[in-house]
Image (cartoon, rainbow, N blue to C red):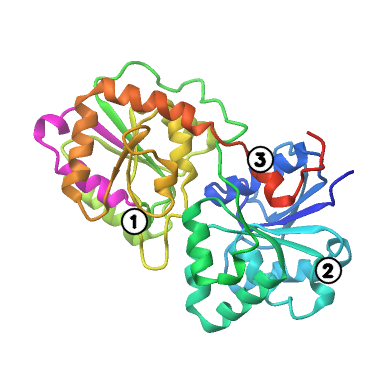
Amino acid sequence: MRAAPIHIFTHEFHPRRGGIATVTEEMARAAASLGAAVDVWAPAAPPGATEPAWPFAVHRLPHRGTHDFPCVLATARTLVRERRRLRPATVWLAEPGPMLAMMTLQGIPAFRPHRIVLTFHGSEILRFHRNPLTRWLTRRLIRHAARIGTLTEFTRDLLCRHFPGAADKVCLTPGAIRSVSAPPPDDADTAPRAKVRILTVGRLHPRKGQRQTLQALLALPAAARAQIEYWIVGRAVRDDYARELRQAATAADFPVRFLDDLDDRQVEAAYAQADLFAMTSIDHGLSVEGFGLVYLEAAAHGLPVVAHAVGGVREAVVPDVTGLLVAPDDPAALTASFARLIADPALRRRLGDAGRAWARRHDWRDSARRLFDLSTAKP
């Protein structure tokens, strides 16, 4: 029996990079591999961007992919225009933007698909709950949903605590490493290094904790600082925060490189050239780290991880097995963790080797089966 068509709506998709974009792309690819007919409705690609050869259909929508009113309205219009196609299908609202669009339409049954599937990632739960109107609309959306996915137990518990009506519909759909990795560029430098290279990959935002990592490295003893360099990869989404980071880096007596928004091949090269990975995420207002696929990507490259024990990070990093987890309010312990790994290459190898196996424990196809109920689809 062939599965019902799956229509995926997202405001984050290739060529934009990030956790939600990766989840959407990989779940679409997995569902297609299981025999489902998949259509992805995604924001317009930038001029000159190349569309990969996807194993599913991609429809580009006339918006930039933010969660502001014009983008949400553009998605809502598409849901209305395509209602006859969507009505008998499974419609997956993969992140907050499409959820907000559906919230504006769900009071009209004719605009509501037969089977709605949702995925919550973390921060949007707090944002939706804070506002009385979106709190009410989210409760209604959850009532209309057939199934709800979360990548972690942390996010599941957060959702059920704020929206108890989700409890009997939620299922865990763990994240996994990318099924298709871009090869590093031919000129990538993989020669042995004199210094321990520490890498952070993530958008420049206070929640991602680049400030805390840099401060911890600056607090190392002089002998340890002389052994390191720090690479920061990610696009600036807060100009004030990016300026603050660059200003703080001027106090460093070790190299600090800001590599901005690299493409996939360049990110692969950065992983290949690193010795350890650090992303010390923190809770920042209503923004929380629901999981962090980047921790799995780093582990898959054999990098030991240093991170804060917050949110879903505790499900992405195994303490003292694949990395070192530190309480976010203990900067001295964070500095000590870096010092320990800088001084002990055998420990770095042990954690990195364990990380390779850990990163491969989940498969996107298993998560797609659970979320879309594809148990009867072809293997």
Q: Position of residue 262 (x, y in %)?
A: 48, 39
The magenta segment is 209-230
Left or right placement of residue 250 versus residue 32 in this view: left
- Earlier sequence position, callout 3 versus callout 2: 2
Q: Nearer the viewer, residue 61 or 33?
A: 33
- Name the residue at the top extreme: 192
- Helix or strand or loop: what does disc 1 sit on? loop
- Helix or strand or loop: what does disc 3 sit on? helix
State whether residue 48 appears in this view: no
> For mark 3, what is the residue?
366
Q: Amino acid at mark 2?
A: Arg
- Helix or strand or loop: what does disc 2 sit on? helix
Residue 231, placed above or below residue 243: above
Pointers 3 and 1 in contact (C-beta within 8 Å): no
Q: Amino acid at mark 3?
A: Asp
Q: Quadrant of the C terminus?
A: top right
Left or right placement of residue 376 versus residue 99 in this view: right
> For mark 1, what is the residue?
282
Q: Position of residue 376 (x, y in %)?
A: 82, 42
- Name the residue at the bottom extreme: 132
> For mark 2, what is the residue?
81
Q: Position of residue 256 (x, y in %)?
A: 27, 38
